[in-house]
Protein backbone atom coordinates (compact mmCIF):
# COMPACT_ATOMS: atom_id res chain seq x y z
CA UNK A 1 0.00 0.00 0.00
CA UNK A 2 1.47 3.24 -1.18
CA UNK A 3 0.07 5.35 1.68
CA UNK A 4 2.15 3.34 4.14
CA UNK A 5 5.25 4.59 2.34
CA UNK A 6 4.25 8.19 2.86
CA UNK A 7 7.15 9.81 4.71
CA UNK A 8 6.77 11.87 7.86
CA UNK A 9 9.97 13.45 9.16
CA UNK A 10 12.11 11.19 6.97
CA UNK A 11 10.39 7.99 8.14
CA UNK A 12 7.69 5.96 6.37
CA UNK A 13 4.24 6.08 7.90
CA UNK A 14 4.45 2.33 8.45
CA UNK A 15 7.38 2.80 10.84
CA UNK A 16 5.44 5.40 12.81
CA UNK A 17 2.45 3.07 13.01
CA UNK A 18 4.65 0.24 14.24
CA UNK A 19 6.08 2.49 16.97
CA UNK A 20 2.58 3.58 17.96
CA UNK A 21 1.38 -0.03 17.97
CA UNK A 22 4.21 -1.03 20.29
CA UNK A 23 3.19 1.68 22.78
CA UNK A 24 -0.50 0.77 22.60
CA UNK A 25 0.15 -2.97 22.97
CA UNK A 26 2.44 -2.47 25.95
CA UNK A 27 -0.06 -0.18 27.71
CA UNK A 28 -2.97 -2.54 27.00
CA UNK A 29 -1.00 -5.51 28.35
CA UNK A 30 0.07 -3.63 31.47
CA UNK A 31 -3.49 -2.37 32.01
CA UNK A 32 -4.86 -5.89 31.65
CA UNK A 33 -2.29 -7.27 34.06
CA UNK A 34 -3.15 -4.53 36.58
CA UNK A 35 -6.86 -5.32 36.40
CA UNK A 36 -6.18 -9.04 36.67
CA UNK A 37 -3.94 -8.64 39.72
CA UNK A 38 -6.40 -6.27 41.39
CA UNK A 39 -9.16 -8.85 41.05
CA UNK A 40 -6.81 -11.58 42.18
CA UNK A 41 -5.66 -9.74 45.28
CA UNK A 42 -8.87 -7.87 46.07
CA UNK A 43 -9.25 -9.88 49.29
CA UNK A 44 -5.56 -9.70 50.12
CA UNK A 45 -6.18 -8.34 53.61
CA UNK A 46 -8.04 -11.56 54.48
CA UNK A 47 -5.16 -13.88 53.61
CA UNK A 48 -2.68 -15.15 56.23
CA UNK A 49 0.34 -13.72 54.37
CA UNK A 50 0.94 -10.05 53.64
CA UNK A 51 3.12 -10.60 50.55
CA UNK A 52 0.05 -10.29 48.34
CA UNK A 53 -0.64 -6.93 50.01
CA UNK A 54 2.78 -5.76 48.81
CA UNK A 55 2.18 -7.02 45.27
CA UNK A 56 -1.20 -5.30 45.11
CA UNK A 57 0.30 -2.05 46.37
CA UNK A 58 3.10 -2.20 43.77
CA UNK A 59 0.54 -2.82 41.04
CA UNK A 60 -1.48 0.21 42.13
CA UNK A 61 1.70 2.33 42.21
CA UNK A 62 2.54 1.43 38.59
CA UNK A 63 1.84 4.62 36.63
CA UNK A 64 0.74 4.08 33.03
CA UNK A 65 1.83 7.56 31.82
CA UNK A 66 5.38 6.88 33.01
CA UNK A 67 5.39 3.45 31.35
CA UNK A 68 4.07 5.09 28.16
CA UNK A 69 6.98 7.57 28.06
CA UNK A 70 9.57 4.81 28.48
CA UNK A 71 7.88 2.62 25.85
CA UNK A 72 7.56 5.51 23.42
CA UNK A 73 11.29 6.20 23.61
CA UNK A 74 12.12 2.55 23.10
CA UNK A 75 9.84 2.31 20.07
CA UNK A 76 11.34 5.28 18.20
CA UNK A 77 15.03 4.53 18.66
CA UNK A 78 15.16 2.79 15.25
CA UNK A 79 13.62 5.79 13.47
CA UNK A 80 15.55 8.59 11.82
CA UNK A 81 14.84 11.45 14.21
CA UNK A 82 16.63 14.71 14.89
CA UNK A 83 19.31 14.16 17.56
CA UNK A 84 17.90 16.91 19.80
CA UNK A 85 14.46 15.28 19.74
CA UNK A 86 15.97 11.89 20.51
CA UNK A 87 18.00 13.33 23.40
CA UNK A 88 14.90 15.01 24.78
CA UNK A 89 12.92 11.79 24.57
CA UNK A 90 15.82 9.90 26.17
CA UNK A 91 15.93 12.36 29.08
CA UNK A 92 12.17 12.14 29.55
CA UNK A 93 12.36 8.34 29.48
CA UNK A 94 15.11 8.31 32.10
CA UNK A 95 13.11 10.59 34.39
CA UNK A 96 9.97 8.51 33.86
CA UNK A 97 11.76 5.22 34.56
CA UNK A 98 13.44 6.55 37.70
CA UNK A 99 10.20 8.08 38.97
CA UNK A 100 8.48 4.72 38.53
CA UNK A 101 11.30 3.03 40.43
CA UNK A 102 10.84 5.70 43.12
CA UNK A 103 7.14 4.91 43.47
CA UNK A 104 7.96 1.21 43.83
CA UNK A 105 10.68 2.00 46.38
CA UNK A 106 8.22 4.05 48.44
CA UNK A 107 5.85 1.10 48.28
CA UNK A 108 8.50 -1.23 49.70
CA UNK A 109 9.24 1.21 52.55
CA UNK A 110 5.54 1.60 53.40
CA UNK A 111 5.13 -2.18 53.34
CA UNK A 112 7.98 -2.85 55.76
CA UNK A 113 6.90 -0.01 58.09
CA UNK A 114 3.31 -1.29 58.18
CA UNK A 115 4.51 -4.83 58.77
CA UNK A 116 6.83 -3.73 61.57
CA UNK A 117 4.05 -1.66 63.13
CA UNK A 118 1.63 -4.58 63.20
CA UNK A 119 4.17 -6.87 64.85
CA UNK A 120 5.74 -4.48 67.36
CA UNK A 121 3.14 -1.79 68.17
CA UNK A 122 1.76 -3.53 71.25
CA UNK A 123 5.15 -4.60 72.65
CA UNK A 124 7.46 -1.76 71.57
CA UNK A 125 5.65 1.42 70.42
CA UNK A 126 8.86 3.43 70.84
CA UNK A 127 10.57 1.36 68.13
CA UNK A 128 7.54 1.83 65.88
CA UNK A 129 7.80 5.61 66.32
CA UNK A 130 11.49 5.53 65.42
CA UNK A 131 11.10 3.29 62.38
CA UNK A 132 8.28 5.49 61.06
CA UNK A 133 10.51 8.57 61.26
CA UNK A 134 13.42 6.82 59.57
CA UNK A 135 11.02 5.58 56.92
CA UNK A 136 10.14 9.16 56.05
CA UNK A 137 13.79 10.12 55.72
CA UNK A 138 14.35 6.97 53.68
CA UNK A 139 11.70 8.15 51.21
CA UNK A 140 13.40 11.53 50.91
CA UNK A 141 16.75 9.80 50.35
CA UNK A 142 15.26 7.66 47.56
CA UNK A 143 13.90 10.68 45.69
CA UNK A 144 17.12 12.65 46.09
CA UNK A 145 19.23 9.70 44.92
CA UNK A 146 17.04 9.03 41.88
CA UNK A 147 16.92 12.72 40.99
CA UNK A 148 20.71 12.94 41.07
CA UNK A 149 20.97 9.83 38.85
CA UNK A 150 18.49 11.33 36.39
CA UNK A 151 20.34 14.63 36.24
CA UNK A 152 23.69 12.89 35.85
CA UNK A 153 22.37 10.80 32.95
CA UNK A 154 21.10 13.95 31.27
CA UNK A 155 24.46 15.69 31.24
CA UNK A 156 24.23 17.83 34.40
CA UNK A 157 27.35 18.32 36.51
CA UNK A 158 26.32 16.80 39.84
CA UNK A 159 29.31 18.12 41.81
CA UNK A 160 28.53 21.71 40.87
CA UNK A 161 24.86 21.15 41.58
CA UNK A 162 25.57 19.77 45.07
CA UNK A 163 27.84 22.74 45.84
CA UNK A 164 25.12 25.10 44.68
CA UNK A 165 22.58 23.32 46.81
CA UNK A 166 24.83 23.81 49.83
CA UNK A 167 24.94 27.57 49.32
CA UNK A 168 21.25 27.71 48.52
CA UNK A 169 20.50 25.54 51.55
CA UNK A 170 21.85 28.24 53.86
CA UNK A 171 19.48 30.81 52.38
CA UNK A 172 16.58 28.39 52.58
CA UNK A 173 17.42 27.58 56.21
CA UNK A 174 17.33 31.26 57.14
CA UNK A 175 13.98 31.68 55.40
CA UNK A 176 12.40 28.61 57.00
CA UNK A 177 13.63 28.76 60.58
CA UNK A 178 10.26 27.82 62.09
CA UNK A 179 9.85 24.81 59.81
CA UNK A 180 13.39 23.63 60.51
CA UNK A 181 12.77 24.15 64.23
CA UNK A 182 9.81 21.77 64.02
CA UNK A 183 11.93 19.35 61.96
CA UNK A 184 14.69 19.18 64.56
CA UNK A 185 12.06 18.99 67.29
CA UNK A 186 10.65 15.95 65.48
CA UNK A 187 14.10 14.36 65.49
CA UNK A 188 14.42 15.12 69.21
CA UNK A 189 11.07 13.44 69.88
CA UNK A 190 12.07 10.37 67.87
CA UNK A 191 15.49 10.06 69.52
CA UNK A 192 14.63 11.08 73.10
CA UNK A 193 11.12 9.51 73.08
CA UNK A 194 9.29 11.67 75.65
CA UNK A 195 6.21 10.00 74.17
CA UNK A 196 5.56 7.47 71.42
CA UNK A 197 2.62 6.30 69.34
CA UNK A 198 -0.23 5.12 71.54
CA UNK A 199 0.80 7.11 74.63
CA UNK A 200 -1.87 9.09 76.50
CA UNK A 201 -0.49 12.58 77.14
CA UNK A 202 -1.68 15.86 78.65
CA UNK A 203 -0.32 19.14 77.30
CA UNK A 204 -1.67 22.12 79.21
CA UNK A 205 -5.44 21.70 79.23
CA UNK A 206 -5.49 19.34 76.22
CA UNK A 207 -5.22 15.56 76.42
CA UNK A 208 -5.45 12.54 74.18
CA UNK A 209 -3.70 9.55 72.59
CA UNK A 210 -0.75 10.10 70.24
CA UNK A 211 -1.72 8.98 66.73
CA UNK A 212 1.06 10.30 64.53
CA UNK A 213 4.41 12.04 64.97
CA UNK A 214 5.20 13.96 61.79
CA UNK A 215 8.04 16.23 60.74
CA UNK A 216 6.22 19.44 61.69
CA UNK A 217 3.30 18.40 63.86
CA UNK A 218 2.14 15.67 66.22
CA UNK A 219 -1.47 14.48 65.97
CA UNK A 220 -3.35 13.53 69.14
CA UNK A 221 -6.84 12.00 69.33
CA UNK A 222 -8.72 13.61 72.21
CA UNK A 223 -11.14 11.83 74.54
CA UNK A 224 -14.09 13.56 72.87
CA UNK A 225 -13.03 12.30 69.44
CA UNK A 226 -11.55 15.28 67.64
CA UNK A 227 -7.95 15.38 66.46
CA UNK A 228 -5.59 17.82 68.17
CA UNK A 229 -2.59 19.09 66.18
CA UNK A 230 0.48 20.29 68.10
CA UNK A 231 3.59 21.91 66.67
CA UNK A 232 6.61 19.74 67.53
CA UNK A 233 8.64 22.71 68.77
CA UNK A 234 5.75 23.81 71.01
CA UNK A 235 5.51 20.31 72.45
CA UNK A 236 9.18 20.27 73.41
CA UNK A 237 8.75 23.63 75.14
CA UNK A 238 5.69 22.45 77.08
CA UNK A 239 5.30 20.25 80.14
CA UNK A 240 4.00 16.97 78.80
CA UNK A 241 2.39 14.55 81.23
CA UNK A 242 2.70 11.00 79.87
CA UNK A 243 0.20 8.72 81.60
CA UNK A 244 1.25 5.67 79.56
CA UNK A 245 4.57 5.71 81.44
CA UNK A 246 2.78 5.63 84.80
CA UNK A 247 3.76 2.61 86.90
CA UNK A 248 1.42 3.23 89.85
CA UNK A 249 -1.36 5.74 90.36
CA UNK A 250 -1.69 7.67 93.64
CA UNK A 251 -5.33 8.18 94.52
CA UNK A 252 -6.63 10.70 97.05
CA UNK A 253 -10.25 11.13 98.02
CA UNK A 254 -12.10 12.88 100.82
CA UNK A 255 -15.47 12.48 102.46
CA UNK A 256 -17.31 14.12 105.33
CA UNK A 257 -19.58 12.78 108.06
CA UNK A 258 -22.19 14.52 110.18
CA UNK A 259 -21.23 16.57 113.22
CA UNK A 260 -23.38 14.42 115.48
CA UNK A 261 -21.00 11.47 114.90
CA UNK A 262 -19.57 10.26 118.21
CA UNK A 263 -15.87 10.07 119.09
CA UNK A 264 -15.99 6.26 119.14
CA UNK A 265 -17.48 6.22 115.64
CA UNK A 266 -14.85 8.66 114.38
CA UNK A 267 -12.09 6.44 115.73
CA UNK A 268 -13.49 3.39 113.93
CA UNK A 269 -13.77 5.05 110.48
CA UNK A 270 -10.02 4.97 109.52
CA UNK A 271 -9.85 1.26 110.28
CA UNK A 272 -12.98 0.57 108.23
CA UNK A 273 -11.54 2.50 105.28
CA UNK A 274 -8.23 0.63 105.52
CA UNK A 275 -10.03 -2.72 105.56
CA UNK A 276 -12.09 -1.79 102.49
CA UNK A 277 -9.06 -0.60 100.50
CA UNK A 278 -7.00 -3.68 101.36
CA UNK A 279 -9.82 -5.94 100.15
CA UNK A 280 -9.98 -4.11 96.80
CA UNK A 281 -7.87 -5.78 94.04
CA UNK A 282 -4.78 -3.99 92.66
CA UNK A 283 -4.58 -1.46 95.51
CA UNK A 284 -2.11 -0.66 98.28
CA UNK A 285 -3.38 1.22 101.31
CA UNK A 286 -1.39 4.29 102.40
CA UNK A 287 -3.32 6.21 105.06
CA UNK A 288 -6.73 7.40 106.29
CA UNK A 289 -7.09 10.31 108.74
CA UNK A 290 -9.70 12.52 110.36
CA UNK A 291 -8.36 15.59 108.59
CA UNK A 292 -10.27 18.64 109.80
CA UNK A 293 -13.46 20.24 111.04
CA UNK A 294 -15.26 21.46 107.95
CA UNK A 295 -18.00 24.08 107.68
CA UNK A 296 -20.73 21.46 107.80
CA UNK A 297 -18.88 18.14 108.15
CA UNK A 298 -16.12 16.23 109.89
CA UNK A 299 -13.70 15.63 107.02
CA UNK A 300 -11.57 12.53 106.36
CA UNK A 301 -8.78 12.16 103.82
CA UNK A 302 -7.77 8.79 102.33
CA UNK A 303 -4.70 7.96 100.23
CA UNK A 304 -4.05 4.69 98.45
CA UNK A 305 -2.09 3.45 95.42
CA UNK A 306 -3.36 1.67 92.34
CA UNK A 307 -0.82 -0.97 91.34
CA UNK A 308 -1.80 -0.74 87.65
CA UNK A 309 -1.89 2.46 85.56
CA UNK A 310 -5.09 1.72 83.65
CA UNK A 311 -7.63 4.49 84.30
CA UNK A 312 -10.70 2.28 83.89
CA UNK A 313 -9.43 -0.17 86.52
CA UNK A 314 -8.72 2.76 88.83
CA UNK A 315 -12.31 3.97 88.46
CA UNK A 316 -13.62 0.45 89.06
CA UNK A 317 -11.59 0.26 92.28
CA UNK A 318 -12.75 3.70 93.44
CA UNK A 319 -16.37 2.78 92.75
CA UNK A 320 -16.04 -0.40 94.80
CA UNK A 321 -14.45 1.52 97.68
CA UNK A 322 -17.22 4.13 97.60
CA UNK A 323 -20.00 1.53 97.63
CA UNK A 324 -18.41 -0.47 100.46
CA UNK A 325 -17.78 2.69 102.46
CA UNK A 326 -21.39 3.76 102.03
CA UNK A 327 -22.65 0.41 103.33
CA UNK A 328 -20.18 0.07 106.23
CA UNK A 329 -20.76 3.57 107.58
CA UNK A 330 -24.50 3.09 107.43
CA UNK A 331 -24.11 -0.15 109.44
CA UNK A 332 -22.45 1.70 112.34
CA UNK A 333 -24.95 4.56 112.22
CA UNK A 334 -22.73 7.20 110.63
CA UNK A 335 -24.27 9.50 108.04
CA UNK A 336 -22.51 11.36 105.27
CA UNK A 337 -22.56 15.12 105.61
CA UNK A 338 -24.08 17.53 103.18
CA UNK A 339 -23.91 21.36 103.11
CA UNK A 340 -26.13 22.76 105.90
CA UNK A 341 -26.60 26.03 107.76
CA UNK A 342 -28.07 26.23 111.26
CA UNK A 343 -29.91 29.37 112.36
CA UNK A 344 -29.72 30.09 116.11
CA UNK A 345 -32.24 32.55 117.64
CA UNK A 346 -30.67 34.11 120.72
CA UNK A 347 -33.70 36.04 122.08
CA UNK A 348 -36.85 37.91 121.13
CA UNK A 349 -37.06 41.60 122.09
CA UNK A 350 -39.97 42.98 124.11
CA UNK A 351 -43.03 43.65 122.04
CA UNK A 352 -43.10 47.29 123.12
CA UNK A 353 -39.66 48.15 121.91
CA UNK A 354 -40.48 47.49 118.31
CA UNK A 355 -36.96 46.29 117.74
CA UNK A 356 -35.92 43.53 115.35
CA UNK A 357 -34.93 40.11 116.67
CA UNK A 358 -31.24 39.52 117.26
CA UNK A 359 -30.10 36.62 115.05
CA UNK A 360 -26.88 34.64 114.68
Image: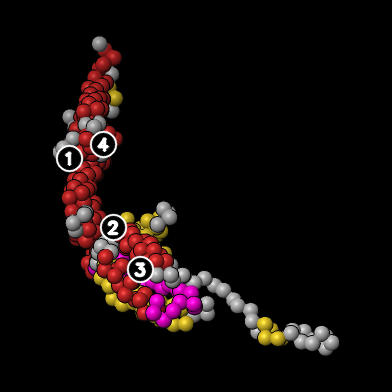
- Which numbered tag is attached to residue 60? 4
Magenta span includes 264 = yes
Labelled disc at residue 50: 1
Q: Secondary structure at mark 1?
A: loop
**Is residue 159 in view?**
yes
Calculate the distance from the C-alpha at mark 4 to the C-alpha at mark 2: 30 Å
Quarter of the figure with the N terminus: top left
State the extent of the magenta-drawn residues as a range. Answer: 237-265
Q: Residue at x 52, y 77 (%)?
A: 296
The residue identified by callout 2 is 198
- Depth check, mark 3 against mark 4: the one in front is 3
In the visual, does 223 lie left or right of 357? left
Identify the element where label 2 is drawn: loop
Measured in 3D between alpha carbons, the distance from the residue under mark 1 to the one under mark 4, in whole angstroms, is 16 Å
Report the number of discs. Answer: 4
Residue closer to the observer: 37 or 357: 357
Q: Is residue 8 above or below residue 300?
A: above
Quarter of the figure with residue 46? top left
Distance from label 1 to label 2 (Cα)? Answer: 23 Å
Q: Secondary structure at mark 4?
A: helix
Residue assigned mark 3:
235
Q: Is residue 62 above or below residue 314?
A: above
CA separation in Å, label 3 and label 4: 37 Å
Q: Residue at x 26, y 16 (%)?
A: 4
Does residue 37 show up magenta in the picture?
no
Q: Quadrant of the C terminus?
A: bottom right
Residue found at x 26% / y 65%: 279
Q: Could you tell me if the residues under marks 3 and 4 are in contact, i.e. CB atoms within 8 Å?
A: no
Whether the residues at callouts 1 and 3 have beta carbons within 8 Å, the answer is no
Amino acid sequence: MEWLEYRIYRNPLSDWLVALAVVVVVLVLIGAVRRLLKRRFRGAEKTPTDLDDLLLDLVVRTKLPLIAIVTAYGSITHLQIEPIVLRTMRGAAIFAALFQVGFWGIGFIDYFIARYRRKRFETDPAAVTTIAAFGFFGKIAIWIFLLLIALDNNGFEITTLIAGLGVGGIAIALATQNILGDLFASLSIVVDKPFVLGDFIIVGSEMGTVERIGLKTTRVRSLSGEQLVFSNSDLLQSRVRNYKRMIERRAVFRFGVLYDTTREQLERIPGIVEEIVRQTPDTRFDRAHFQKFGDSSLDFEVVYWMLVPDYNRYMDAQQRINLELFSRLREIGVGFAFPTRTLHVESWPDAGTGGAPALR
